[in-house]
């Protein structure tokens, strides 16, 4: 027979394991989304560098593919009966992100192309950092590291900013996603 203290300790151990499993599942799903976005934005930056006049069309396609891919990964992750509801919330989050970002960058900010190129990824990294407050420090590390490298490129990459962003923004997301799979 076990006493109440041993039972309480055993229940705490079980709760700790459940929390670790939940965080591991979140990291596994999120890492797929982060890696996918890393590849997509790298392709977007290279395409934008190659065909500058098509920048808006390129990024529209990249964003739509990324949003659809993120929702598909979330919906078909098999994490349980709430996966579909999570996918809907993710779609709503993307829509709010886009509307707020357009309001800040176009309506309030009147950003030029170079500022716009840096605003969106740094704005996105804010949400990665916020997610890290709930889901684990990996999101915060990815957000802060990527943002710092983006800002460095803004000031020092000159005309090679698109190539810098392909390597730094896309590369950091891919590496961060792979790191999340190892945690």
Image (cartoon, rainbow, N blue to C red):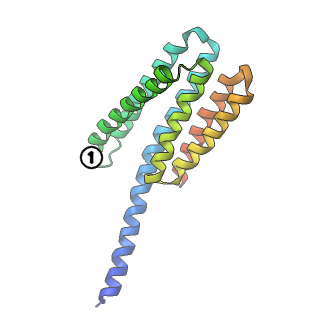
Q: Is residue 84 left or right of residue 40?
A: left
Residue at the spot 47% in from the left edge and 41% down from the top edge: 127
Residue 16 x %, y %: 40, 68
Q: Residue furthest left?
A: 81
Number of other residues with Cα within 10 Å of mark 1, as a class: few under 14, some 14 to 19, many 20 or more: few
Instruction: Give the vertical position of 47 relative to 164 (above or below).
Output: above
Instruction: Give the vertical position of 156 relative to 73 (above or below).
Output: above
Residue 45 x %, y %: 60, 22
Q: How many marks?
A: 1
In the picture of the structure, the residue carrying the numbered disc 1 is 82
Instruction: Give the vertical position of 35 relative to 17 (above or below).
Output: above
Q: Quadrant of residue 161?
A: top right
Q: Quadrant of the N terminus?
A: bottom left
Decide which of 7, 127 is in the foreground and name it: 127
Residue 39 x %, y %: 55, 31
Residue 147 x %, y %: 61, 38
Decide which of 81, 163 is in the foreground and name it: 163
Decide which of 45, 155 is in the foreground and name it: 155
Dot 1: element: loop
Residue at the spot 52% in from the left edge and 34% down from the top edge: 123
Q: Residue furthest top?
A: 53
Q: Quadrant of residue 148?
A: top right
Residue at the spot 56% in from the left edge and 29% down from the top edge: 119
């Amino acid at each position: 027979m076990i006493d109440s203290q041993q039972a309480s300790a055993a229940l705490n151990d079980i709760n700790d394991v459940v929390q670790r499993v939940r965080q591991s599942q979140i990291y596994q799903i999120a890492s797929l989304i982060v890696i996918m976005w890393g590849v997509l934005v790298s392709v977007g930056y290279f395409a934008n560098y190659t065909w500058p006049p098509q920048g808006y069309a390129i990024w529209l396609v990249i964003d739509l593919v990324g949003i659809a891919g993120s929702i598909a990964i979330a919906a078909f992750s098999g994490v349980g009966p709430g996966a579909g509801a999570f996918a809907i919330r993710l779609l709503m989050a993307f829509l709010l992100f886009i509307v707020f970002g357009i309001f800040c960058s176009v309506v309030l900010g009147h950003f030029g192309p170079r500022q716009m190129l840096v605003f969106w990824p740094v704005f996105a990294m804010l949400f990665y950092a916020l997610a890290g407050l709930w889901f684990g420090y990996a999101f915060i590390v990815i957000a802060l590291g990527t943002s710092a490298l983006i800002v460095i490129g803004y000031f020092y990459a000159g005309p090679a900013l698109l190539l810098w962003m392909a390597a730094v923004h896309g590369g950091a997301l891919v590496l961060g996603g792979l790191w999340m799979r190892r945690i």
